[in-house]
Image (cartoon, helix red, strand yellow):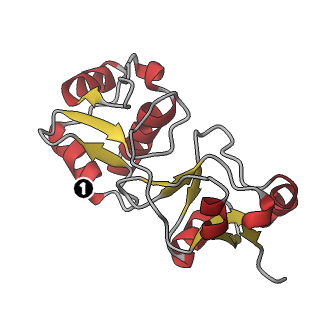
Amino acid sequence: MTTLEQKSKLLSRWLRHRPDAIGLELDKRGWVDVAELLLKSADAGVVLTQDELMQIVVENDKQRFSLSEDQMRIRAAQGHSVDVDLKLPVKTPPPVLFHGTVQKFIASIRRQGLLPGTRRDVHLSATKQTAAEVGARRGTAVVLTVETYPLLHDGYQFRCAENGVWLIPDVPPKYLRFPDK
């Protein structure tokens, strides 16, 4: 039996990284028809009801999913590794944002800055607490502070996903503040 949490993780995988795993095709904005998603999920052996899907969308603590106004389409709010354009507007961020990571990545980040890896953008948080929670998923969290005004001054653009995650293509090391040891 697949729990609601497991179904939520599968939805993240399908809508962010591997729609092909169940034969889905996302449109260029990342949307897929809810009815098609439910059908393809069942065909893949994961029975997901409309009610369960709505519960996952509403109750997901990170608000990872967005429904269209008519609730006929769904997409991941951010975090894609597949080629989609969410058409998020450019937005001015607060003076500082935060990024949660773990110690093993700090040396690389000091050299290269924050890079998106397999995703399309670097994810930043508006609060230290959220960044710490993100970092803690991989071990003991290290929270980096991102100076946003110098980035803006140098031509970088920020976007904010519907769930409050700030997105930027990369953050060079000179814009980062590392915690004292």
Q: Quadrant for the N terminus, please.
A: top left
Left-right relation of 20 to 53: right
Front-lying residue, 136 or 118: 118
* Disc 1 packing (10 Å; few <14; some 14–19; many ≥20): some
Residue 36 quadrant: top left
Residue at x 38%, y 19% (from the top left corner): 25
Place of residue 175 in the rendered image (x, y in percent of width and height, measured from the top left):
73, 65
**Label 1 sits on residue:** 58
Under circle 1, the secondary element is helix
Residue at x 57%, y 55% (from the top left corner): 123
Residue at x 76%, y 56% (from the top left corner): 172
Give the amino acid type for the residue marked by disc 1 in the picture.
Val
Whether 145 is drawn above or below 66: the answer is below
Q: Quadrant for the C terminus, please.
A: bottom right
Place of residue 87 in the rendered image (x, y in percent of width and height, measured from the top left):
38, 39
Please identify the residue farthest to the left as the structure is shown: 70
